[in-house]
């Protein structure tokens, strides 16, 4: 294993932007906005470089970093150390894809942030700090470092919601902090138990150790820790009934921040369940497979039904996110290769589709200052481009063939049909309901009775084209050429399914 600092450079590259922003005059609006955007580009460039290096044959292990960081002395033996914590970064195929997704959405959300009307300096500094936390979560190779980056995402999100959100922004910010703080506390307990019992926080070492006969934890304790992980990451995903905080965030936070929240931060929950739940506790994960599948179907149907009865488009999309995260749980509950692959594809697909939908909601809200469906009728007459892209995003979300949503849903349900056909058939009703609530809402907005005059309102502006075209392009690319994801993922899937007790 070679030591390089490529990943550290990737993760902490936004820090340079934070430092430069600190010295810019706070009234220099254009300078701050463009610097905030430029500061996201190095991470994007480096993540794509890693992808193409991997495609050309470079082993991802070559990007690994390991440096001695913290040592805990044994009070009973002079000069001896009991526990050592290393600064460890690394990526596999799954982490690489999540890093690229984070870098892409961060750049596009920085463009969407041009709509921010006040205190741009503080906003972009917090925005870039959030990006560091997200990149760190996906590259951390030990649980303590993972937890530090995990926590690093909470504070900037709290202020970004509470300072730059809408009318009930404070309630949304505190709801976010309380729920996610409780999830973090549960996660910390799991990490401390594992660390104290094994003497290591290295994820690879824990994965190996927990799957040997010499594992220092009893099976009941392993099951308890897995259930605790399900709660900790279930808050993040979110799993019903741990979801109420997310609704407020989706409605009250700035659309640019919701792009990152729905596109990336929710996916940390899925990443954690796959990386730590399925990876470290595979036998216990098998025992919970039916529960996960049931929770997935409940999420799917509950979110779809509640989305159908909403009158505010932001709330439709919020419940839609809950519903679509049910597909991730369905794939995990299948606990076979097509199911796990479908879950990972859904993580990426929904990240892109939800980012596109919330970007378009932001475009609308910035112009007409409402997201109520009844007030948006007739959009196609005055803003035909926005209306067209909104329809395209809806088609992707409901799983139209040729778009990324179809690939992820097909694989997740294929996996579940192999294991639990009756439950899969019930869950398939959620796909039908998804088409109903999305088409109902989007058609009402684009072709419904006009409650206002959209003529004369600016359609997509020049700087707004980049997020729309990039997101639509990626959604279609994955839909017609899923190997762009499945290639890097194959080694990860082999490790998950066969290398850790699968």
Image (cartoon, rainbow, N blue to C red):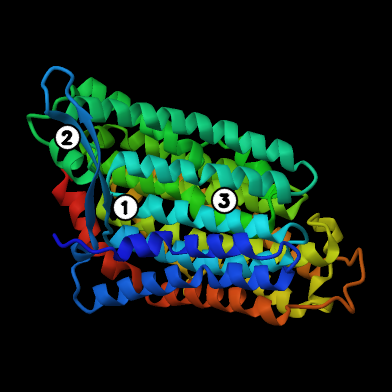
Image quarter (top left, top right, bottom left or bottom right) of the N terminus: bottom left
In this view, 38 is above or below 92: below
Give the residue at mark 1: 340
Residue 259 picture location, percent across and down:
59, 59
Q: Earlier in the sequence, mark 1 or mark 3?
A: 3
Q: Earlier in the sequence, mark 2 or mark 1?
A: 2
* Mark 1 neighbour density, 10 Å: few (under 14) some (14–19) many (20 or more): many
Residue 486 picture location, percent across and down:
30, 67
Rendered residue at 43%/57% (across/down): 346
| Residue furthest top in the image | 76
Numbered disc 3: secondary structure: helix
In this view, 221 is above or below 408: above
| Residue furthest left in the image | 213
Rendered residue at 37%/71% (across/down): 46
Residue 201 picture location, percent across and down:
24, 38
Label tally: 3
Q: Is residue 327 left or right of residue 486?
A: right
Q: CA distance from mark 2 to mark 3?
A: 33 Å
Give the residue at mark 2: 210
Image quarter (top left, top right, bottom left or bottom right) of the C terminus: top left
Give the residue at mark 3: 321
Q: Nearer the viewer, residue 111 or 340?
A: 111
In this view, 377 is above or below 344: below
Rendered residue at 43%/68% (across/down): 43
In this view, 220 is above or below 65: above
Numbered disc 2: secondary structure: loop
Numbered disc 1: secondary structure: helix
User: Which image quarter: residue 293?
Assistant: top left
Q: Is residue 304 left or right of residue 346?
A: right
User: Which image quarter: residue 432?
Assistant: bottom right
């Amino acid at each position: 294993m070679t030591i390089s600092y490529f990943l550290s450079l990737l993760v902490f590259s936004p820090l340079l932007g934070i430092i430069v922003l600190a010295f810019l005059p706070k009234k220099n609006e254009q300078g701050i906005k463009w610097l905030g955007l430029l500061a996201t580009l190095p991470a994007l460039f480096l993540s794509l470089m890693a992808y193409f290096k991997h495609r050309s044959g470079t082993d991802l292990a070559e990007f690994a970093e390991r440096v001695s960081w913290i040592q805990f002395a044994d009070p009973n033996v002079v000069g001896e150390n009991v526990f050592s914590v290393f600064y460890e970064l690394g990526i596999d195929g799954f982490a690489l894809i999540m890093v690229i997704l984070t870098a892409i959405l961060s750049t596009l959300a920085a463009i969407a942030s041009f709509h921010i009307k006040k205190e741009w300096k503080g906003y972009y500094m917090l925005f870039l700090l959030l990006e560091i936390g997200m990149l760190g979560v996906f590259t951390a190779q030990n649980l303590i470092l993972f937890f530090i980056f995990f926590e690093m995402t909470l504070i900037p999100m709290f202020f970004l919601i509470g300072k730059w959100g809408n009318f009930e922004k404070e309630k949304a910010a505190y709801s976010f902090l309380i729920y996610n703080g409780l999830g973090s506390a549960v996660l910390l307990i799991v990490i401390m138990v594992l660390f104290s019992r094994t003497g290591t926080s290295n994820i690879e070492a824990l994965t190996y150790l927990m799957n040997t006969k010499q594992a220092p934890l009893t099976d009941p304790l392993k099951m308890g820790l897995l259930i605790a992980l399900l709660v900790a990451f279930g808050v993040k995903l979110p799993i019903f009934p741990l979801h109420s905080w997310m609704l407020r965030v989706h409605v009250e936070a700035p659309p640019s921040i919701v792009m990152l929240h729905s596109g990336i931060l929710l996916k940390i929950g899925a990443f954690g369940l796959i990386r730590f739940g399925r990876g470290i506790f595979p036998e216990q994960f098998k025992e919970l497979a039916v529960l996960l599948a049931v929770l997935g179907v409940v999420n799917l149907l509950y979110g779809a039904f509640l989305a159908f009865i909403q009158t505010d488009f932001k709330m439709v999309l919020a419940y839609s996110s809950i519903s679509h995260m049910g597909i991730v749980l369905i794939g995990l509950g299948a606990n076979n290769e097509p199911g796990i692959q479908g879950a990972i594809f859904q993580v990426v697909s929904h990240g892109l589709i939800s980012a596109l939908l919330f970007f378009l909601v932001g475009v609308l809200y910035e112009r007409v200052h409402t997201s109520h469906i009844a007030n948006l009728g007739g959009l196609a007459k005055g803003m035909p481009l926005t209306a067209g892209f909104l329809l395209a995003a809806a088609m992707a979300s409901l799983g139209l063939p040729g778009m990324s949503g179809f690939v992820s849903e097909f694989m997740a349900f294929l996996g579940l049909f192999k294991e639990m056909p009756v439950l899969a058939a019930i869950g398939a009703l959620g796909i039908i309901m998804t088409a109903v609530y999305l088409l109902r809402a989007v058609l009402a907005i684009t072709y419904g009775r006009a409650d206002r005059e959209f003529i004369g309102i600016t359609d997509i502006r020049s700087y707004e084209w980049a997020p729309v075209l990039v997101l639509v392009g990626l959604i279609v690319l994955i839909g017609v050429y899923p190997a762009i994801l499945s290639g890097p993922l194959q080694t990860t899937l082999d490790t998950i399914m066969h290398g850790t007790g699968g």
